[in-house]
Amino acid sequence: MPKFKGPGLSVLKKKIRDNERLLKKENLPANIRVEHERALLGLQEQLSMAQLEHKKQKIFERYKKVRFFERKKAERRIKQLEKSLKDETMDDEKRKQCEKSMRKCQIDLMYIKEYPPLTKYVSLYAEGTSEQTEETRNRIWAEMEERFNSGRKHKIPSSGSNRVPVQEKSSTGGDLEDEFLQR
């Protein structure tokens, strides 16, 4: 996951404090007050997005190693199943069982790669976990299975998950606000 690009949290908080201090002045002309109120709203939005990205990054870094090992395990299992499916001497019943296992492993891989970024990662292959953990794992796995069956395999937020769509920077009007904020 790439690092968040943009002003840091402390820079945004400082700009917000500066604008709030300026807006506390009573003898501020109306047009300047309106400009700074708009800038304050924009800065607060930027701060919330930056905090969200910071939280995503923190969670990603915490569970990166676990997800790596689980991904390797799932990929290795898929590779083994592909190899066994190439075997032409396999009977139909065993082939169906391998295809079913292959589908399950593909959903497992999707679970690992597409896990909701703002949620504590629940390991797929951990044993001896609590009922609540099992319930969370099964709920998210079922969501991934539904997405897999519908053909929405990658990078599509599903309902109920806490994925946040990335906002694209518009080419019109964005430069004016940036110039204003840098004064």
Image (tube, rainbow, N blue to C red):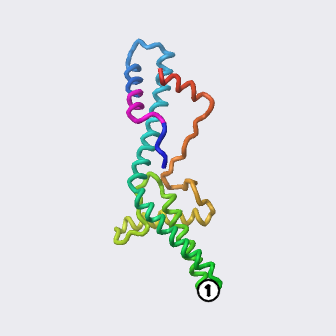
**Above or below: residue 19 compared with residue 59:** above
Left or right position of 122 against 101: left
| Residue that carries the numbered disc 1 in the rendered image | 90
* Image quadrant where residue 100 sits: bottom right
Q: What secondary structure is found at the residue carrying circle 1?
A: loop
Dot 1, crowdedness within 10 Å: few (<14), some or many (≥20)? few
Left or right position of 174 against 131: right
Residue lying at 49% horizontally and 38% vertically, measured from the top left: 5
- In front: 31, or 95? 95
Does residue 66 belong to the magenta stretch?
Answer: no
Residue 36 % position (x, y): 47, 22
- In front: 181, or 44? 181
Residue 1 % position (x, y): 48, 49
Question: Amino acid type of disc 1?
Answer: Met
Residue segment shown in magenta: 6-15
Q: Farthest residue to the right: give it.
A: 88
Residue 117 % position (x, y): 46, 53
**Above or below: residue 130 compared with residue 53:** below
